[in-house]
Amino acid sequence: MEEGFIHRLHKADTGSGLASIAPLADMGVPYAMLLYERFLGRPFAGHRDSVSELVGDILETAIEELLTRHGITYRKTKRAERVEGFEQAPDFIIPNEFNPQVIIEAKLAEDDGTARDKVTRVQHLHTLSMRGRTEEEGPRYEVVACIAGRGFKQRKQDMRKLIEATRGKVFTLETLAQLVEHTRLKAFETREVAKGA
């Protein structure tokens, strides 16, 4: 190899073929680090973009399973779907779009830009919920955020806005089991679930 140049395969996960990967896997090295985006550039970003929706589905699937387990009627919207009364359809409407009582926005964000966009969206939903109402009357529907990913950990100010817009109703994958108990979803529960189930 020419002096002063580094071959793109001369790195920890490819230097010795398959034997290089096992110790890295044992240490729990993240997939992104193994692929060395700085060497591969757009091909890795293309891969990451192609699976981001699948990864994001983990959170939405967990919410669906929880609502179903508790016997809560819900409407999950499709991507870019138009729903009357909302400029952009929320991820979940409980019990349905004709009588929205709880709105759930779910997002897995690995960067602060994506997280910031979701916070702005949740703030807008809160504004819609208060349209034509006083503080004493409270919102027409409860806005809940379910979040995951390091993007939400990067900017404390955005988290503060999210907590204020949801009136504290922010849940992560780790706290999702408490979603029904600590929101208005409890009123729509038709099947009681044992604690810890």
Image (cartoon, rainbow, N blue to C red):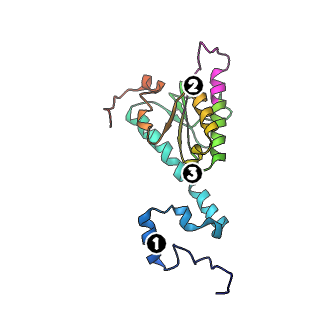
Q: Secondary structure at mark 3?
A: helix
Label of residue 21 in the image: 1
Q: Earlier in the sequence, mark 2 or mark 3?
A: 3
Q: Which residue is mark 3?
A: 53
Q: Secondary structure at mark 1?
A: helix
Q: Earlier in the sequence, mark 3 or mark 1?
A: 1
- Mark in the foreground, 3 or 1: 1
Q: Residues within 10 Å of mark 2 (few under 14, many from 20)?
A: few
Q: Which residue is mark 2?
A: 98
Q: Residues within 10 Å of mark 3 (few under 14, many from 20)?
A: few
Above or below: residue 55 compared with residue 126: below
Q: Quadrant of the N terminus?
A: bottom right
* Residue at left offset 52%, top offset 73%: 12
Q: Quadrant of residue 5?
A: bottom right
Q: Residue 114: image x %, image y %?
A: 64, 46
Residue 80 visible in this rendered orientation of the protein: no
Q: Quadrant of residue 133?
A: top right
- Mark in the foreground, 1 or 2: 1
